[in-house]
Image (cartoon, rainbow, N blue to C red):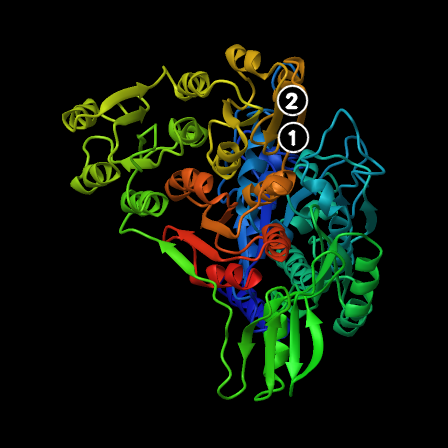
């Protein structure tokens, strides 16, 4: 026993030194080993197992554990579905044939959990030993992998993720099969892909099932029980897994695998010949060793990005084949060319006109190369927008007005003061303020158009259970006579209503049983409108973006649940224009049907890939009616600042631009054209949540 133990340990040491020493920097790779059978499911007991107790389940576990031991220092993380003699469930199938909750099902749930989130870099091997029902002379080694294309069987459905790995299944089988044969000297019974074994068709990673030998053959059963056989089998499987990962994979930008090869040079050569962005992944080191990216994008005026390109020439050719496009250099965001945006920035060097540019930042960048002899002029106004000439001055005056309070409540007050710096004029017939909670958007989403009904009433936000003195001071400064509270007492407390009454204001509360009922009361108050924006009542972005336009253009915001628009709401749509805002994830196609059946004069859905794309589509739709020398900017990541901005748009007639952590390209396209048509005199920033860098980008797009 002592000699055998030392020999086995020495074998492991030498194997690891020879196989693994050259590769010392492995990253995260996963092997999930499934020792077949277990517990009450013994598998075959061969010729002698019923007497000796050495059945297939034990042989499978021994080899599996040895594979794990051989890979301990390989950098491959190894998991076993079982490490003891156990079953996963007391049955394989139910009486109706279903495998749900059975041993196979639970076994694979556990296996797939080990690979979750790292499926592409995981492999699954189910280790078995074979039996023949009638012929004791059959022996040899077999490898099985799943082929869900040529040999898919309707009665044996596969996991949807498995179908992605058919080529990898074949490659893994191709690594393991000859290695095991060479190590064991077994008879080759071949690689088969025509079986739909449960474990390999439900593995969410590349998978094979191996049959190490026949326990119904006397000679092979005797070998299977020896440590020599077990060690060699485990060594062969372990080395095969190591070699499986020693490849280079080429992926496109959609993470679709284009090539797998053992040759690094071949992978790199292939990647460099591609005309689209690709990356080369060293699967062994678990890192990208080469990556290409496009340098240019072509954007359409209203349809967003049309394509990405490696070279300016191919991008330009593509852009010119369409109307209303612009060519953007990705690394700095410059618009290099456009067939619809005006080239309104003229570069002068030493007093002579050098060139004209669509993008101020592009013009400024080029001017920097001619320092100290260059200036950029806005050809529309004739003003100097940039200069590096001594004693020359920038004459373009474009104020950036910041309406930023210490919090959302004080920001709303800043907006109110911007609207009415001297308070309500004595001649103003309707001296109303709208009061809404600053902690929830549901009730107040549709309040923007109500502001128009009351002569551009400012929206002031409260905390719900009390009104701070600075809010009451603002109401006094405005010389308000009436306050309209939006929402029930759970949103704006009874105490706030009492405070307002004590200020000698007429107080009216608009509320319903829920946000949709409240919305209907608001719509009833607004009365006759030209159209309705149908937006989600479960999220705020689309309604916020549309509210300023609704307020300006005699439209209203109609809130809808995800799948159903109330009958009361549908009655209002008859003979009116209707625009559904947002994709099917926000409002399902059921809403289209319900809106259409309500007999509006016209209806359409405006939807982008996110809230900013949707807003851009709304702005383009109403662009002919937006005429202002200013723009409003606020965050689209939260609701309070933009909610308070809707009434301001009534006064300024300006579009509201919402931004996230980056500046959306479709919105950028819109304001570049808007700034080209209207000579901007002011940019108004509402709230402090917009990053300075984005504020600067917007400012420069309309300079």
Q: Position of residue 452 (x, y in %)?
A: 44, 30
Q: Position of residue 597 (x, y in %)?
A: 66, 13
**Whether residue 194 is situated above or below residue 172 in the rendered picture:** above
Q: Are marks 2 and 1 in contact (CB under 8 Å)?
A: yes
Q: Residue at x 85, y 56 (%)?
A: 321
Q: Residue at x 67, y 28 (%)?
A: 604
404 to the left or right of 616: left
Q: CA distance from mark 2 to mark 1?
A: 8 Å
* Viewer-nearest residue: 32 or 613: 613
Which residue, as the protein is rendered here, is positioned at the far front? 427
- Residue 476's tag is none
Visible in this render: residue 275?
Answer: no
**Whether residue 522 is situated above or below residue 672 in the rendered picture:** above
Q: Position of residue 188 (x, y in %)?
A: 82, 51
Which residue, as the protein is rendered here, is positioned at the far left? 502
Neighbours of disc 2 within 10 Å: few (<14), some (14-19), many (20+) = many
Q: Which residue is mark 2?
A: 592
1 to the left or right of 472: right
- Residue 605's tag is 1
518 to the left or right of 312: left
Name the secondary structure under disc 2: helix
**Whether residue 700 is situated above or below residue 142 in the rendered picture:** below
In the picture, residue 193 is in which quadrant? top right
């Amino acid at each position: 026993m002592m000699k055998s133990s030392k020999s086995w340990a020495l074998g492991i040491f030498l194997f690891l030194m020879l196989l693994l020493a050259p590769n010392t920097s492995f990253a995260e790779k996963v092997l999930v080993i499934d020792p077949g059978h277990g517990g009450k499911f013994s598998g075959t007991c061969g010729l002698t197992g019923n007497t000796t107790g050495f059945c297939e389940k034990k042989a499978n576990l021994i080899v599996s554990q040895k594979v794990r031991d051989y890979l301990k220092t390989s950098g491959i993380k190894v998991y076993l579905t079982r490490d003891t003699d156990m079953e996963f469930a007391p049955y394989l199938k139910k009486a109706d044939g279903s495998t749900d909750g059975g041993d196979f099902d639970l076994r694979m749930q556990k296996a797939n959990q080990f690979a979750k989130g790292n499926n592409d870099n995981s492999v699954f091997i189910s280790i078995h030993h074979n039996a023949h029902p009638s012929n004791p002379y059959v022996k040899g080694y077999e490898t099985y992998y799943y082929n869900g294309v040529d040999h898919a069987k309707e009665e044996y459905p596969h996991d949807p993720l498995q179908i992605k790995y058919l080529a990898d299944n074949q490659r893994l089988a191709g690594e393991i099969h000859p290695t095991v044969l060479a190590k064991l000297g077994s008879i080759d019974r071949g690689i088969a892909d025509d079986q739909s074994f449960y474990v390999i068709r439900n593995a969410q990673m590349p998978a094979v099932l191996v049959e190490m030998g026949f326990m119904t053959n006397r000679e092979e059963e005797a070998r299977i029980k020896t440590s020599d056989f077990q060690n060699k089998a485990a060594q062969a499987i372990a080395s095969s897994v190591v070699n499986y990962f020693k490849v280079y994979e080429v992926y496109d930008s959609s993470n679709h695998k284009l090539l797998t090869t053992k040759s690094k040079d071949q992978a790199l050569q292939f990647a460099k010949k591609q005309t689209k962005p690709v990356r080369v992944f060293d699967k062994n080191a678990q890192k990208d060793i080469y990556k290409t990216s496009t340098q240019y994008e072509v954007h359409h005026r209203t349809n967003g990005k049309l394509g990405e390109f490696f070279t300016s020439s191919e991008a330009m050719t593509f852009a010119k084949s369409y109307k209303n496009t612009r060519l953007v250099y990705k690394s700095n965001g410059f618009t290099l060319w456009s067939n619809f945006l005006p080239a309104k920035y003229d570069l002068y060097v030493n007093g002579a006109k050098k060139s004209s540019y669509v993008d101020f930042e592009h013009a400024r960048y080029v001017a920097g190369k001619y320092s100290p002899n260059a200036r950029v002029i806005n050809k529309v106004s004739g003003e100097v927008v940039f200069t590096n000439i001594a004693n020359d001055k920038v004459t373009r005056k474009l104020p950036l007005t910041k309406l930023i309070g210490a919090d959302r409540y004080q920001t709303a007050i800043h907006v109110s003061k911007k609207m009415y710096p001297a308070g309500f004029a004595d001649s103003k017939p309707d001296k109303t303020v709208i009061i809404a909670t600053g902690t929830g958007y549901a009730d107040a989403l549709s309040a923007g158009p109500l502001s128009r009904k009351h002569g551009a009433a400012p929206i002031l936000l409260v905390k719900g259970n009390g009104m701070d003195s600075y809010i009451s001071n603002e109401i006094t400064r405005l010389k308000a006579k009436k306050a309209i509270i939006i929402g029930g007492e759970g949103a704006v407390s009874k105490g706030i209503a009492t405070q307002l009454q004590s200020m000698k204001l007429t107080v009216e509360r608009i509320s319903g049983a829920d946000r949709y009922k409240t919305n209907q009361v608001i719509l009833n108050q607004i009365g006759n409108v030209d159209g309705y924006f149908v937006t989600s009542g479960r999220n705020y972005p689309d309604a916020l973006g549309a509210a300023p336009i609704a307020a300006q253009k005699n439209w209203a915001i109609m809130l809808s649940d995800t799948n159903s628009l109330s009958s009361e709401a549908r009655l209002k749509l008859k003979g009116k224009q209707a625009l559904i805002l947002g994709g099917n994830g926000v409002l399902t196609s059921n809403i289209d049907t319900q809106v259409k059946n309500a007999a509006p004069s016209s209806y359409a859905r405006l939807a982008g890939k996110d809230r900013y794309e949707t807003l851009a589509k709304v702005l383009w739709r109403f662009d002919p009616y937006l005429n202002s020398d200013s723009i409003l900017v606020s965050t689209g990541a939260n609701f309070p600042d933009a909610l308070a901005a809707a009434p301001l748009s009534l006064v300024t007639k300006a579009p509201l631009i919402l931004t996230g952590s980056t500046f959306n390209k479709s919105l950028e396209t819109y304001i570049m054209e808007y700034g080209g048509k209207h000579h901007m005199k002011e940019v108004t920033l509402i709230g402090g949540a917009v990053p300075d860098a984005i504020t600067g980008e917007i400012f420069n797009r309309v300079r």
